[in-house]
Amino acid sequence: MPRRPAAALATSGEVLRLIRAGEAVTRADIGRVTGLSRPAVSLRVTELLDRGLVVEDSEGPSTGGRPPTRLVFNASGGIVLVASLGASRAQIAVCDLAGRELARESLAVDVEEGPDVVLPLVMDTWSRLLAGRPLSQVRGVGLGVPATVEFAAGRTESARIMASWTGVAVPPIIAERFPVPVFLDNDVNVIAIGEHRAVYAGEADDLLFIKVSTRIGSGVIAGGEILRGALGAAGEIGHIPVRDGGGVLCRCGNIDCVDSVASGTAILRDLRARGHEVKTLADVVSLVRAGDAETMTVVRNAARMLGEVVASAVNLLNPAVVVLGGDVAETFQPMVSGVREVVHRRSTALSTRNLRIERSRLGPGAGIVGCAHMVLDHILSPEAVDSLA
């Protein structure tokens, strides 16, 4: 185990990072890795024990004599409140400090009703899910919304939803009721974080997540970190135009954006235009299962147009894996197959040599996982832990 200079690793927060990572699990380990003296190690460990961030476990392996006391990260030492909002559904949960889900509800919401309606609904649900747990246990809040978000400011900038969300600083609203650090990000960014951390961490640190649902969006993991861009606008794949889109006007004002021609909303619109009485994607699923030829044609055409845009993104970003999620991608295998076919035909041979294109393995739970890690990465960082002193 390499020794680091004591001056470079001298805080309680940095010691907690070592314990969480499993790099140092006893006081002796900490001293060996950091070069800190025994009294300095004892002081930092005592601070972490007092804050409830670590606990002692006397079941450590013995090399002869009394077994050393192990230091274990205390995931039950607090909770975080998280919510992943889509256009029509919200996943709302309470998680422990390891990001494990303790309680969760899935709610139908109309996010276009705006923050004055939706945020109180989310906060009421958190209060219900707390189920008697004291508010003092809440360490942070994380929220994903279907809008472009300036992450550092916690403010929505432009929205795939109604203008009532644009320019809203969400953290102060939530902090009035839950006075803890509040973090806000784009809904697809948090889903991408969730898929990466739960499924691909250590395996694929360059990942492109495409959400195909009521709308189309993407999240980019580059070098293991979410790529937000200068103003939070990275990943707006839904507003890249496609060829032969038919001249469909997108809500952004442009023509033939992939969001306007290949999303769940577009599929429903095109089927209605062909005389099918479809109200929801569940109706489309029924037609696909029945082998309806027109429905299959519409879905495959949507997959082709989405595939063109994804192929360009693959050439630009060179991800190791493309994950397709959201109601449409998770429901229609022809969508995934169609995208895969176009990407391998249109992207460069090198960018597709080892490329995997897969459906989401987490499904609706990805946003919850991502929101939890978004919060935990900040509140458990060495700097944040040290600021508690």
Image (cartoon, rainbow, N blue to C red):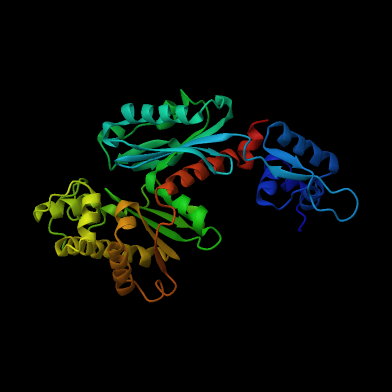
* Residue situated furthest right in the rendering: 65
Quick check: can you spot residue 248? Answer: no
Q: Look at 77% across and 52% down and name the residue there.
A: 33
Count of number-bearing discs: 0
Q: Is residue 192 left or right of residue 62?
A: left
Q: Position of residue 1 (x, y in %)?
A: 76, 58
Q: Nearer the viewer, residue 265 or 242?
A: 265
> Residue 100, located in which quarter of the rendered image?
top right
Q: Nearer the viewer, residue 282 or 271?
A: 282
> Residue 361, located in which quarter of the rendered image?
bottom left
* Residue situated furthest top in the rendering: 176
Quarter occupied by the C terminus: top right
Q: Is residue 122 above or below residue 191?
A: above
Q: Position of residue 123 (x, y in %)?
A: 42, 28
Q: Look at 43% across and 47% down and name the residue there.
A: 365
Q: Is residue 276 above or below residue 179?
A: below
Q: Is residue 78 above or below residue 365?
A: above
Q: Position of residue 124 (x, y in %)?
A: 41, 26
Q: Position of residue 47 (x, y in %)?
A: 73, 34
Q: Is residue 93 left or right of residue 261?
A: right
Q: Is residue 283 left or right of residue 85?
A: left
Quick check: can you spot residue 238? Answer: yes
Q: Is residue 330 left or right of residue 361?
A: left
Q: Look at 46% across and 54% down and name the residue there.
A: 195
